[in-house]
Amino acid sequence: MRSRKVFLALVAVVLAVLLAGGMAVLLRPTPVPPAWANEYDVSAIAPETIAPGTFVDRSAPTGWSHLVIKSLPRVRPSEEAHVPSVPIIGRDLTIRMVAWMFTAFTADVVREQQGDRTRYRLRAIGLGLGTNVNGRDVVITTETARQHGAEMNFIKDEVLTTGYRIQKQALIPVHGPSCALLDTPVISRCGTKHRTIRYRYALLVDTKTGALDVLLWLLGGEGGECADLTRAVRIEPNCIDEVEMVPDPAEFNGGRPSDLSFAVDKLPAYRVEMPFPPELRELAGKTKFTPNEAHALEDGLRKMTAQSRP
């Protein structure tokens, strides 16, 4: 009889432990995902194309809140003599064609009402190419150039087609409500050669005011050549980048220029240079992100930018 009571007591203890464990599971709070968990699109989308016919001067064009960079390329005067004389069109026309086309990089930050609060969100990033038409810089494509008044020929058609082919390689690997990354191909002097490398732009929106900070660093080429993850620069607002291009005569195949014939050898105009903290460099160089990583990078960039302000 006594052994039976002992056994029943042990069973009661075991049941109590099991019930307590079960209750603990039932009472344990379900983890709540952070508010930003679904806000980052990390699917690597393409930027928008700025609508043909858009006039781009020295500030945000119609349909966009910010002009990030307008690039006005030209051959560096001291390098003009190194441009080979291309058959049929010659050296002078080749030099003029380098300066015929401009590039535009825009952003659209929109105002939203959230209850009794006003917040600002990054809606989109835009890229486009254009030329001067009757004294106005206008975005065009090969299909729309003539209807917008641009005088075209086979050389200009080829320049514009090549420009858009290169520009369409640009990707947005991260797009959140207040931060986005844009990776865009750039022909750059890398050592003694011209290579296609990637610039990475980070766009940071002040959600209270709509102000935009734009950071830039070098991701480098496919093999990491000419990458620089030790520093970033903050681009001037409404940056008008008078790009000086340098030629590589070896890239004129049989006298015909290739995609690598002309390259940049310095960054656009910037306000300040900021060193990357060592713990942020791996994130800064990633090409694919999780939402957690995107959030961590945005947080790190904001802290880095805040520390650089006077």
Image: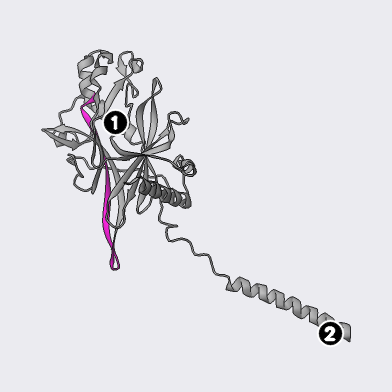
Q: Amino acid at mark 1?
A: Gly
Image disc number at residue 9: none
Foreground disc of the pair 2, 1: 2
Q: Looking at the magenta stretch, what is its main secondary structure?
A: strand
Which residue is found at the position 38% from the left and 49% from the top? 302
What is the span of residues highlighted in magenta in the rendered image? 98-118
Is residue 119 in view?
yes
What residue is shown with label 2?
5
Q: Residues within 10 Å of mark 2 (few under 14, many from 20)?
A: few
Dot 2 or dot 1: first in sequence order is: 2
Answer whether residue 101 is magenta in the image: yes
Which residue is found at the position 32% from the left and 21% from the top? 261
Q: Are marks 2 and 1 in contact (CB under 8 Å)?
A: no
Relative to 85, residue 232 above or below: below
Q: Helix or strand or loop: what does disc 1 sit on?
A: helix
Q: Residue furthest front?
A: 310
Residue 68 x, y percent position in the rendering? 27, 42
Is residue 154 in view?
no
